Image (cartoon, rainbow, N blue to C red):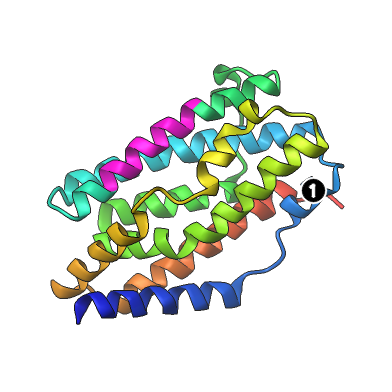
Amino acid sequence: MTRHSATGLAARARREIADATSQNRFVDLLESGGMPRERLVWLAAEEHRIVSSDRRSFALLAARFPEAPSGELFLGLAQGEGQALTLLSDFAAALGESDENLRNYEPKPFAQVYPAYLAQRAAFGTASEVALAMLANLEEWGAYCSRIAEALCTRYGFRKADVGFFTFFAESPPGFEEQALDVIASGLASGDDPEEAVRAARLLHAYETAFWDALAEGLS
């Protein structure tokens, strides 16, 4: 019954996120072929901060919830963020930017609300909140990454090796959905509030939207 409830909760969160989804101007403009190089540097530098923060957030969650199934899920996510950082360096290098340049970049405040919220939930939230938020938002994020990788190669002359960061995130990690549903079910069984979990999913989506809007600000 609890696993059934977790599946239903995930479906509800996905519906609410789909209803709130609007056009992604940054990705649309990227696909048009007219994205200024400066904005690609913004993308790399903002992601460098986001992935670095998310890696620590998932490591904290693995420490807070070390028992299965939560510990395995969050440890795997932290390791995945580590892989992504390496791939992001390849994209930055193709742009002519070093890791030091990425670290010295001045971030856009609204581009960083997503990792700030994830860090807050990592410190104070439940495992089921984070698992549901990640599960419900992963499909949209993956679709954007797939579109970005394709556009960078076909419209801007990047090699496939340069866009590995985006192709890495274009597909869900093997077994992720089952793991996440197990974490959600376990949390619900122990008394986690399902409304708070859905709220976390909605907020994470809103903050991801703010990220894309910040990258596209001022572009026409």
User: In the displayed structure, does residue 92 sit left or right of residue 220?
Assistant: left
Q: Is residue 55 above or below residue 91?
A: below
Residue drawn at the location 60% of the way across and 51% of the way down: 211
Q: Is residue 157 above or below residue 140?
A: above
| Pointer 1 local density, CA inside 10 Å: few below 14, some 14–19, many at least 20 | some
Residue located beneath label 1 in the image: 31
Residue 102 magenta-highlighted: no
Residue drawn at the location 76% of the way across and 32% of the way down: 38
Q: Nearer the viewer, residue 132 or 104?
A: 132
Q: Residue 110: x, y in percent?
A: 59, 51
Residue 75 magenta-highlighted: yes
Q: Nearer the viewer, residue 154 or 95?
A: 154
Q: Which residues are magenta?
A: 74-86
Q: Is residue 7 visible?
A: yes
Q: Residue 162: x, y in percent?
A: 64, 27
Question: Of all residues shown, which one is farthest toward the front?
Answer: 174
Image quadrant containing the N terminus: bottom left
The amino acid marked with disc number 1 is Glu
Residue 19: quadrant of the picture: bottom right
User: In the displayed structure, does residue 184 sit left or right of residue 161?
Assistant: left
Residue drawn at the location 43% of the way across and 34% of the way down: 52
Most common SS among magenta residues: helix
Residue drawn at the location 67% of the way across and 41% of the way down: 149
Q: Residue 154: x, y in percent?
A: 79, 38
Q: Is residue 191 visible?
A: no
